[in-house]
Image: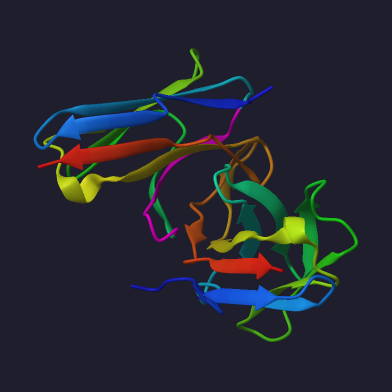
Amino acid sequence: KNEVEQSPQNLTAQEGEFITINCSYSVGISALHWLQQHPGGGIVSLFMLSSGKKKHGRLIATINIQEKHSSLHITASHPRDSAVYICAVRLNTDKLIFGTGTRLQVFP
Amino acid sequence: EPEVTQTPSHQVTQMGQEVILRCVPISNHLYFYWYRQILGQKVEFLVSFYNNEISEKSEIFDDQFSVERPDGSNFTLKIRSTKLEDSAMYFCASSGRRQGLAGLRSYNEQFFGPGTRLTVL
């Protein structure tokens, strides 16, 4: 049973499109992370949130605790946004439980 | 901007050999983690470390694995006798001090290193 589900698994877009990636989880959490993994493998933390909404540049992350759902939005997408986007949840401990990731490709 | 570093970037070893993966966490962080990602699979938690001891570990982290903070800056993961299935990308992460209100604990963001790709032949 997957505790963290992401959709879609793969996503292609044209430059400039608005992107939405969804994450649903089945357990009670203390925080949710959105991470970006580039083709070389490195992982970059984009957001950590436990309620509401956060914005950083063209990225917006929202979470609905009651519905156990989070979304990551990218406005005005660009080819350099191409990466795997990973949702990870933190339970009432230190460890993160990861989703399988959404592979995004943005074409010029 | 401070960052987590890991060495080596790629390690190739023979099955049965011992390997040590090294990490230098962000200097004022107190919580340290190891994760691994087998090719094509999701990232999995291995172990968390605080105050010079393991605070949590997963089922993957068996007796073949150990962690150590040998000095004030390094954090290492040792695999005693590597198996083919240990081939993966290993990520170190660190986070700062916990902050929380009474009855509510909040956790700080984890910062990840670039990873070490371990190949066991």
The colour scheme of the drawn protein is: rainbow
Residue located at (52% from left, 66% from top): B115
Q: Taking B99 as reference, is B23 above or below it? A: below
Relative to B102, A37 lies left or right: left
Q: For the magenta stretch, what is the residue range?
A: A29-41
| Residue B110, image x, y percentages | 51, 55
Visible in this render: residue B23?
no
Quarter of the image for the N terminus of chain A: give it.
top right
| Residue B5, image x, y percentages | 49, 75
Q: Is residue A33 magenta?
A: yes
Q: Taking A104 as reference, is A4 above or below it? A: above
Residue located at (57% from left, 60% from top): B97
Relative to B22, A53 lies left or right: left
Residue furthest right in the image: B63
Residue furthest top in the image: A67
Quarter of the image for the C terminus of chain A: give it.
top left
Which one is nearer the viewer's eye here, A41 or A56? A41
Q: Taking A10 as reference, is B22 above or below it? A: below
Picture mark count: 0
Q: Is residue B92 magenta?
A: no
Residue furthest bottom in the image: B71
| Residue A67, image x, y percentages | 48, 13
| Residue A39, image x, y percentages | 37, 55
The image quadrant of residue B88 is bottom right
Residue located at (73% from left, 59% from top): B86
Relative to B34, B115 lies left or right: left
The image quadrant of residue A8 is top left
Visible in this render: residue A78?
yes
